[in-house]
Image (cartoon, helix red, strand yellow):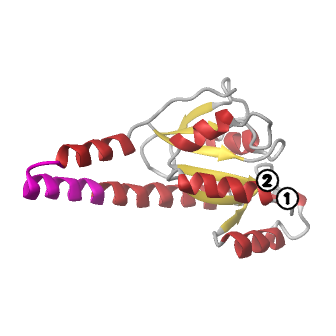
Amino acid sequence: MRQVGIFGKRKSGKSTLMYALTRHKMIQDAAFRAMEISGMTRVMLVDTVSVDVEDDSTAEQSAQSVEVALMLITNDSFELELAWISKLRKAGSSVIVVISKADEFADGGKALAAAVEEVSGLDTLCVSSQTGAGIVELDAAINRKLQSQNTTTNSASSNAHALRTNAGTGSDCIASSVAIAGSSVTLGKG
């Protein structure tokens, strides 16, 4: 099952965002939740360990397994989040930056979003899990990221097939790497 991970510091609203995205008030196991995203096939939504804990090895493992990573930012001290964005991108995840708790900002988080966009070069969404503002847009952004990865995976599969057809040898390694890239790993929350 494809995975979407929610990353951020402690108290950044990771679990609350998970509830808002899954449209549930309470989730028995807050670490994982299967859900539909805008008509996509089911995905596993992963509420990760905070990125600002001393032993972030569980968050590091999650970074290796998610296709799309939501990086939550709640204030103008976001250097750690920027470092994690870099880690996530190096691990092959598509990153969506989210100004979480946007309802707590007088401007809805727009100034912070502009600052993050300027430094990171990534589009940033302002979301309030409490009011629901930005949830539909976030759902659509996740869907777009997953669809673009489908296109990339399908293109890679076509390329691997063409290499098998044309080259005849050595293509098993290419086909295996495509299969591994599409596999899913289930991790626990620690």
Residue picked out by circle 2: 131
Which one is in front in this view, the residue at disc 1 or the one at disc 2? 1
Residue beneath the point at 62% across and 59% down: 96
Tell me how far mark 1 sits from mark 2, CA to CA. 7 Å
* Residue 120 falls inside the magenta stretch: no
Residue 133 appears at what percent x and percent y?
A: 74, 59
Amino acid carrying mark 1 in the image: Asp
Q: Which quadrant, please, contains the N terminus? A: top left
Residue 23 numbered mark, or none: none
- Tag on residue 103? 1
User: In this rendering, would 156 be left or right of 112?
Assistant: left
Q: Is residue 19 above or below residue 98?
A: above
Q: Measuring 51% from the left and 40% from the top, which residue is drawn there?
A: 65
Asked if the magenta segment contains residue 158, the reply would be yes
* Quadrant the C terminus occupies: top right
Callout 2 environment at 10 Å: few (<14), some (14 to 19), or many (20+)? few
Circle nearer the N terminus (1, 2): 1
- Look at the image and give the residue range highlighted in magenta: 155-170
